[in-house]
Image (cartoon, rainbow, N blue to C red):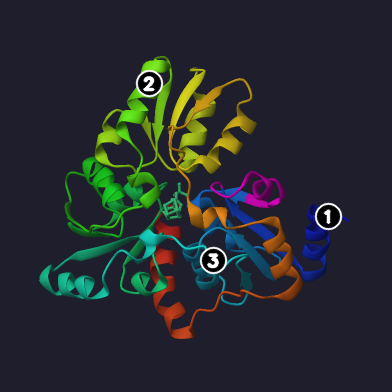
Amino acid sequence: MNITERIQRLKQEKDAVILAHYYVRPEIQEIADYIGDSFYLSKTAVGLKEQTIVFCGVSFMGESTKILNPEKTVLMPDLAADCPMAHMADEEEIKRLKCTYEDLAVVCYINSTAKLKQYSDVCVTSANAVKIVKALPNKNIYFIPDRNLAHFVAEQVPEKNFIFNEGYCPVHEKMQLHEIQKAKEEHPQAEILTHPECPEGIRNISDYIGSTSGILKHAAESDRQEFIICTENGVRYELKKQNPGKTFYFTETEPVCEGMKLITLEKIAHVLETGENEVQVPEELIRESVKPLQNMLRLAK
Ligand code: 13P
Ligand code: SF4
């Protein structure tokens, strides 16, 4: 029995389902029951019939899944798969700003720890941040942890006052403008499709800015044949699968999320077999951090 067959058998035995983000390795995307961006995965995780959810992604994703589904067993193939940005905000600063600004909404990118979510009013993902911020009655918005997504949203919601935090995604932050410009010179017909976690200089030369699923949708619907993709390289697999006739270029320095790439088929089989790496969130933290996640699901409808 090969590893894929072993995982399929274990899934049935353990009443388990596999969710995966587009940034994980192609062979994981191949065996996942549900694959998507952060918003799709958080919606999908609610109401699944299986008792066990194996989350192939980074820790804040497994944690959010547990918070939204406390009665389920959530397993992470590798507990070391973390997102550095998820820790880049400060609870004390949130408390200070809440005292300073009357009418402050703390808007928390889902790429954050449960500890940060518990002090937040609403979560967002890159797919729904603009819509949700526009829908809030509050004028003052403290957007954590990502400064790049915050600035992207602020540009589109000029009627609100944004307070920025200095967090960032190391993968998107490190992308080099000159490498993208070089790719554009070599492929002048190519459209530049960019994730909003990228810095302003890259966003400014882009033809489209959107979440991972937004990039996929745009590439499928565009009549162009070539695209320069400014996001993590795992998305290449789905782009090619959906558009076999189109060509996708990434920057010369491949954008790789180390946490996402820690997930392997062997680790999935191992956690299914042993029940190891179960996500644990204290009850009180679940009670506090579920509110902004539920607010996101309601406001994004
Ligand atoms: P999306 O899944 O919202 O596109 O975000 C990308 C990301 O960095 C996930 O960690
Ligand atoms: Fe975090 Fe960036 Fe990796 Fe997304 S790509 S999980 S934001 S480090």
Residue linked to disc 3: 62
Q: Position of residue 216 (x, y in %)?
A: 52, 35
Quarter of the image for residue 96 reads bottom left
Q: Which residue is mark 1?
A: 5
Quarter occupied by the N terminus: bottom right
Residue hosting label 2: 184
Q: Is 207 covered by the magenta stretch?
A: no
Of badges 1 and 3, nearer the viewer stands: 1
The circle on residue 173 is: none
The amino acid type of the residue labelled 3 equals Gly
Mark 1 CB within 8 Å of ligand 1: no
Q: Which residue shows up at 36% across the image and 23% down it? A: 182
Residue ID at (56%, 76%): 70
From mark 2 to mark 3, how far is it between C-alphas?
37 Å
Disc 3 secondary structure class? helix
Q: Is residue 25 magenta?
A: yes
**Residue 108 relative to residue 241: left or right:** left
Position of 72 compared to 184: left or right? Answer: right
Residue 227 place in picture, x, y as percent: 47, 25
Q: Residue at x 43, y 19 (%)?
A: 190
On screen, 42 above or below 254?
below
Query: Where 106 falls versus 249 (above or below)?
Result: below
Residue at (39, 40) in percent of width and height? 195
What is the distance, in whole Å, between disc 1 and disc 2 at their CAs?
43 Å
Question: Which image quadrant is residue 189 in?
Answer: top left
Residue type at mark 2 is Lys
- Residue 149 versus residue 227 in the image, above or below: below
Q: What stretch of residues is rendered in magenta?
A: 22-34
Marks 1 and 3 sit apart, C-alpha to C-alpha, by: 24 Å
Q: Which of the two residues, 34 or 48, is positioned nearer the viewer here? A: 34
